[in-house]
Amino acid sequence: QVQLVESGGGLVQPGGSLRLSCAASGSMFSVYTMRWYRQAPGKQRELVAAITSTGTTNHADSVKGRFTISRDNAKKTVYLQMISLKPEDTAVYYCNADIQTGYSHVNIWGQGTQVTVSS
């Protein structure tokens, strides 16, 4: 069974940095676009950044210049480097990916990792 496992969340002070990781595991042929979403309490889940299998990236306006998405295709892992963190970045961050298994093209989610920005 294919799954995504996130790590790297935690508590950080405003202005601090964190790096999130998300690794795909299980039986699969290819990992296509990988994404990071976040959901703050009482708000809808929003797309933070996305990266295609060839490395083309897209970042939400609210994080441009502060967050950087990247990936290691050999490790089937996507990263989100976050700097200059603000209290409004506090949310549960979810990894999402389009994956080709032996039978189908599926979209799967990780379990989420909490990021809290507070002094």
Image (spheres, helix red, strand yellow):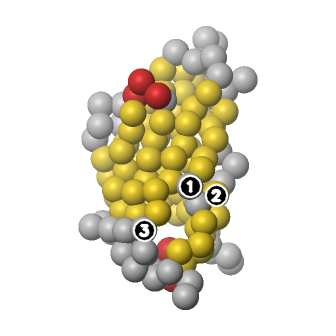
Q: Is residue 57 left or right of residue 1?
A: left
1 and 2 marks in contact (CB < 8 Å): yes
3 and 1 marks in contact (CB < 8 Å): no
Of badges 2 and 3, nearer the viewer stands 3
Q: In this view, does 91 lie to the left or right of 52?
A: right
Q: Which residue lies furthest to the top in this view?
A: 102
The residue singled out by tag 3 in the image is 17
Q: Position of residue 28 (x, y in %)?
A: 58, 18
Instruction: Answer above or below: position of 113 versus 16.
Output: above
Look at label 1 and name its amino acid: Gly
Q: What element carries label 1?
A: loop
Q: Position of residue 79 (x, y in %)?
A: 44, 47
Labels 1 and 2: the sequence-earlier one: 1
Look at label 2 and name its amino acid: Thr
Of badges 1 and 2, nearer the viewer stands 1
Q: How crowded is mark 3: few (under 14 residues within 10 Å), some or many (20 or more)?
A: some
Q: Distance between the residues labelled 2 and 3?
A: 15 Å
Q: How crowded is mark 1: few (under 14 residues within 10 Å), some or many (20 or more)?
A: some
Q: How far apart are marks 1 and 2 (CA)?
A: 7 Å
Instruction: Answer above or below: position of 35 versus 46.
Output: above
Corner quadrant of residue 52: top left
Q: Where is residue 29 in the image (x, y as percent from the top left)?
A: 52, 15
Q: Which residue is drawn at 58% across and 60% down?
A: 9
Q: Which residue lies furthest to the bottom in this view?
A: 119
Between 37 and 12, the one nearer to me in the picture: 12
The residue singled out by tag 1 in the image is 8
Instruction: Answer above or below: position of 26 versus 77.
Output: above
Labels 3 and 1: the sequence-earlier one: 1
Q: Is mark 3 on a helix, strand or loop?
A: loop
Q: Which residue is drawn at 29% across and 37% down?
A: 55
